[in-house]
Image: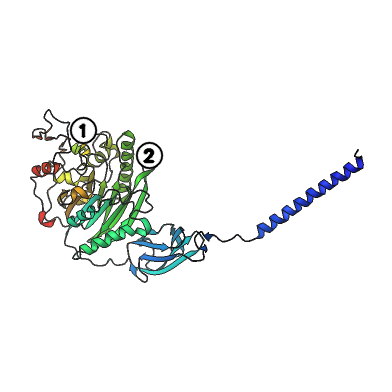
Amino acid sequence: MITVEERIMETKRIIIAVVLVALVISSVSIVLLTLPEPPPTNPLNGTDTTAPVLTITNPSNQSEVFGAVSLSFTATDNNTIGRYEIHIDGVIVTVQQAYNWNTMGVADGIHNITFRARDEAVNWGESVIFVTVNNSIIPDYDFSGIFKIMAYNIEESGVNSDWKEVVKEENPDILMLVETGDFDNNGNMQLQQVVEEFNDNFVDELPYSGFCAQDIFFTTSGEAILSRYPVMAFHQIPVVTLDDDAGYDVTHDFIDAIIDINGTSVHFIGMHLKAGGGESNIERRNWENEGILNYMDNLGNVPIVYLGDMNSYSPEDTVTIDNDYGYGPMTMLVDPDDPIFGNYSSKVHNFTDVYRALYPSELGYTYGHQYAPLLGRIDYIIVNDFFTDKLINATVGDTAHADTGSDHYSLDLFVTWNGTGASTISTPAYVGIRQRAPTADPSVIQLDIQNDWIYRERIPQIDYIAVQLAMNHCWRNRNIE
């Protein structure tokens, strides 16, 4: 039998043991907390102490720059690179490998640019260059007075290389590309490759400079612009302001490249409105266009070219076999008296749909040559009234590689800067070019002159290019092509 005294002694021993264990655990914890954290290691090579190696692709050290400047670099390392940074004058401006720097917002003079990359072992690679900003004088360049603008959705960042053949066949002076989501990868590598290839091809022309939207995650998103004339500023527009002052996050960021053309700053605004049919997508396109129109109005009375893939139809050539894409955005632009969409039209600018104004009775479709049920015009070059006396001619998908270059046709426009040789543009007559369901004889293509309608059946076997060429009785300035 255990006495009371023995029980008390046993309890004391247990308490002492618990206290001792607690003291040991606390001591171990303190020691562990004070030990330095072991450095990250490369799983292949053991401890990694080697910093990433940086290569600056643009601009070069000690160069003189002006206007918009594309900053870009690449980095290589045996380990995964977890972070990139670009600093201008000690201020971080991006955590990507490329950045579009608008130097008009900084003082002329010397500026330092720091490029940094860090691998998973927390080794930083760094390279610093110095550039001189000089926006006091725009460098001289040859200008003939006539130049060519082109808009082209190249399909999934140029999934078919024939798109580049189309550009070489067209030879534009200013090129707006749509669906360039891969162009910004790895420090604008694909953009730079494209610019170099075109410059090597057009050896007798002014060289292109190129800019593209940044931080794009999908091949079907993003826009890029190539220009033979100086790009003075480049803006990426991810959010627009609607009429009720609400901000709207657009599906595909707009871009606004301000280009000097013979001493005049022209805004080239690239668009790619939400794709797909259905009420939800139609509504999103309407909001996106409403917002970018407000952006244009806020620019004031300046020259504007609005171009790209609108993913919707024009009220001037209503497509009734598939109206699931809607007409809102184009109606806002060309019909400010419309009782619905006219409420969202510009309060500052009058806009012209270039192709329809020049060729009111031609098809001019830009999409559907690879899928006839969706045949229609969804890509546009739109200009404000600064250009209405400067339009020469336009073409759609008329080169040797047009059918294979992309699921869209390219659209181009010749502009005469002083108005010499311009086509006469009258008030739009809203000519209806309508694609109707098949007639009783689906192989018949009829032209109803009285109503100015085109009835066309929908099966893919029809040679739509032959149809368009057969109807093309308008003069074309082919010697400029």
Kind of element beneath mark 1: loop
Does residue 10 lie above or below 174 as drawn?
above
Could you tell me which residue is drawn at 11 percent across and 30 percent down? 441
Q: Residues within 10 Å of mark 1 (few under 14, many from 20)?
A: some
Q: Quadrant of residue 211?
A: bottom left
Q: Earlier in the sequence, mark 2 or mark 1?
A: 2
Residue indicated by mark 2: 244
**Residue 220: x and y, percent?**
32, 47
Image coords of residue 24 (percent x, y):
74, 54
Q: Is residue 229 visible?
A: no
Identify whether 250 is placed above or below 230: above
Label 2 to label 1, Cα distance in Å? 34 Å
* Quarter occupied by the N terminus: top right
Numbered circles on residues, count = 2
Give the amino acid at mark 1.
Ile
Compared across the picture, whether 419 is left or right of 134 comes to left
Task: Judge from the rendering whether residue 215 lies leftward or rightward of residue 427; answer left or right.
Answer: right
Which residue is depicted at the point 25% across and 61% down? 197
- Residue hosting label 1: 321
Q: Which amino acid does the dot numbered 2 rest on?
A: Asp
In the rendered image, residue 261, in percent from the top left (x then y), is placed at 23, 59
Q: Residues within 10 Å of mark 2 (few under 14, many from 20)?
A: few
Where disc 2 sits, the SS reads loop
Disc marking residue 367: none
Q: Nearer the viewer, residue 214 or 158?
A: 158
- The reply to whether dot 2 and dot 1 touch (C-beta < 8 Å) is no
User: Residue sitting at 69 percent across and 58 percent down?
Assistant: 31
Give residue 77's position: percent from left, percent from top.
44, 63
Task: Work out whether residue 62 can be spotted.
Answer: yes
Left or right: residue 19 compared with residue 367: right
